[in-house]
Image: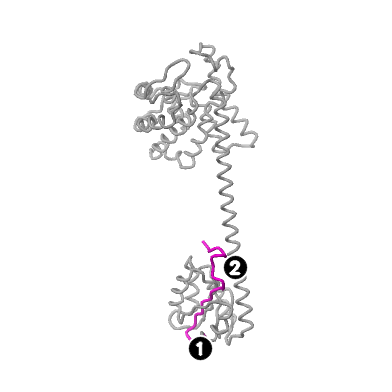
Amino acid sequence: MSAAPQDRPSRPTILIVDDTPDNIMLLSRLLKDKYQTKVATNGSTALQVAAATPDLDLVLLDVMMPGMDGYETCRALKGNPATADIPVIFLTAKNQVEDEAMGLAAGAVDYLAKPISPPILFARVATHLTLRAARRQLEVHNQDLERMVQQRTAQLLLMQEALILAMAAMAEGRDGEPAKHLRRTQHYLRALAMALRGHPRFAASLSDENIELMVKSAPLHDIGKAAIPDHILRKQGRLDPEEFEVMKLHAAYGRDTIMLAERHLGGTNTFLMFARQIAHSHQEKWDGSGYPENLSGEDIPLAARLMAVADVYDALISHRSYKPAFSHAQALEIMRQGRGTHFDPDVLDAFFALEAEFARIAREHADETAPAP
């Protein structure tokens, strides 16, 4: 990263490279009043000085030098990321068109013929230092813009997450769901996805980006409950069969709500796709006995299979109007009975491998009145 203008020396720094001491003395004398100068008598030394001078602004480089000539030295400067953006002006008695073309091809920005004319030298040096300063200022400006974009993006993502949680909490709160249920299920789902990302069945689907989007969309799993009548949603005790059929509609309502958002956007995106899959299919069961569409096995989207484990575990360890909160051990035993029927066997195996982590998450994000699992 380039240094900010206030951190740089008060005068630009120029490296003079020439194997003739008289030429070095002449150039140093001409430039000393306005610029700081460094000198090197060969290409190898020039590369070392350039690499060791982070504030170097310009190189005046002789072409005809023994050993490493100016062309080779220039190519080496341009090939090193630390020195690649330092402008190089060739100084040479060679004034054929092909010589200038070779110098420009090597990466030089200009060509000055010897013997040096001081007015031309001053003009060319000033021009390229002005361009160098402008490029640096633009780089600083672009870095500032990038930081601003990153900050604004982070703020928008936080606002998006807060809005998602608020919308989901409104739906969850209507039926008395525990306040921190949404956060717990997010953490459960992340733990499961991270544990399964190396599994041959799931590796292609569980990229870092997909996991993050699944986690962010998880709170919307019961968004469809917003459309369920209060007398069913808030009923104390178990639902009768007719009421349960109405309650089951929340999966389709959730899907429809997210599809409405997709239509407004003119198409879907990965976040909304996962949200729709989770909302619509998290109540499906591995053996096809779930709802709303009796999907089975791999036909159930992976995001919904992960959510099913997270949601059921949290429901078991949480108090409901129709049941007390089960202990962690009791929840494990109930879930074990659902392997291959309710739950994808591999996903449930990952859950059991992580059961201590699930218990930790439940304790860390416990509702204020809830006993420890």
Q: Name the residue: 55% across, 83% down.
A: 27
Is residue 309 among the parts visible in the rendering?
yes
On the image, the x and y values in percent for residue 278 come to 51, 30
Q: Name the residue beneath numbered marker 1.
A: 22
Residue 102 visible in rendering: no
Q: Earlier in the sequence, mark 2 or mark 1?
A: 1
Judged left or right of residue 298, residue 110 is right
Q: Is residue 138 magenta?
A: no
Q: Nearer the viewer, residue 286 or 115?
A: 115
For the record, the magenta segment spans 1-23
The amino acid type, in three-letter code, at marker 1 is Asp
The crowding category of the residue bearing disc 1, from other C-alpha atoms within 10 Å (few below 14, some 14 to 19, many at least 20), is few
Looking at the image, residue 165 lies above or below residue 35:
above
Under tag 2, what secondary structure? Answer: helix
Image quadrant where residue 143 sits? bottom right
x and y percentages locating residue 24 in the rendered image: 51, 84
Instruction: Give the amino acid at mark 2.
Output: Ala
Q: Residues within 10 Å of mark 2 (few under 14, many from 20)?
A: some
Quadrant in which the C terminus appears: top left
Q: Position of residue 262 (x, y in %)?
A: 61, 34
Numbered badge on residue 33: none
Which quadrant of the structure image shows residue 338?
top left
Q: Which residue is mark 2?
A: 133
Q: CA distance from mark 2 to mark 1?
A: 30 Å
- The coloring applied to the image is one colour
Left or right: residue 106 versus residue 188 is right
| Camera-side residue of 84 and 167 | 167
Q: Please tell me how many numbered marks the rendered image carries.
A: 2
